[in-house]
Image (cartoon, rainbow, N blue to C red):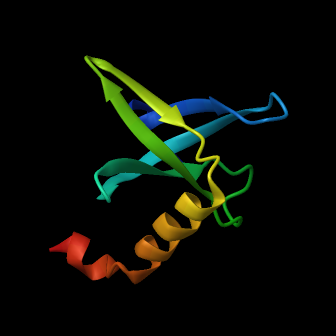
Amino acid sequence: MAFDEENVIEITDDDGTVLRCELYDILEYEGKQYALLLEETSADTEEPEIVLMRYVEEGEEVFFETIDDDEEFAKVQEYIETLDPEEDEE
C-alpha cells in the first residue's frame, strides 16, 4: 500500500515502536476532534489497521493523543460505525 507522503505521520506506541500512518480522516464528535489513521502495512495483501486518536490543534501545532478513557473510545468507535461511507464520497 503506497501512502501519500504528505499525509504520513509517525506515532510511537506504548512499547516505543514507531508506526507510520496515513491521515485518513478527521471527524468531530461531542465537541472534540478525532483522527482516523491507517497504519502502514508490510505487504499489499494485508488490510491496514485503523488507529483512532484524539486530534488537537494548539495554535499552528497539531497533536495526536491516545484516548485513554475506555468509555470515550467506545462511544467514538460506535459513532464511526454508524457513519455512512457513501456520504463522504458525494
Residue 42 vs residue 74, the one in the foreground: 74
* Residue in view at x 64 percent, y 46 percent: 68
How many numbered marks, from 0 up? 0
Q: Is residue 82 above or below residue 42?
A: below
User: What is the x, y in percent for residue 74?
Assistant: 57, 68
Horizontal placement of 30 versus 21: left or right? left
Q: Position of residue 28 (x, y in %)?
A: 30, 56
**Toward the viewer: 24 or 57?**
57
Location of residue 44 by image quarter = bottom right
Residue at image position (32%, 82%) is 84
Which one is nearer the viewer's eye here, 39 or 54? Answer: 54
Visible residue check, residue 19: yes
Tell me what residue is drawn at x 14 percent, y 74 percent: 90
Residue displayed at 22% across by 77% down: 87
The image position of residue 5, as x and y in percent, is 44, 33
* Residue 77 point in image, percent of width and height: 52, 69
Query: In the rendered view, does 56 fall on the left or right side of 38?
Result: left
Depicted 71 relative to depicted 19: above or below: below
Can residue 1 be spotted in the picture? Answer: no
Q: Residue furthest top?
A: 60
Pick the front one: 49 or 71: 71
Left or right: 12 as drawn, with respect to 23: right
Q: Residue furthest right?
A: 15
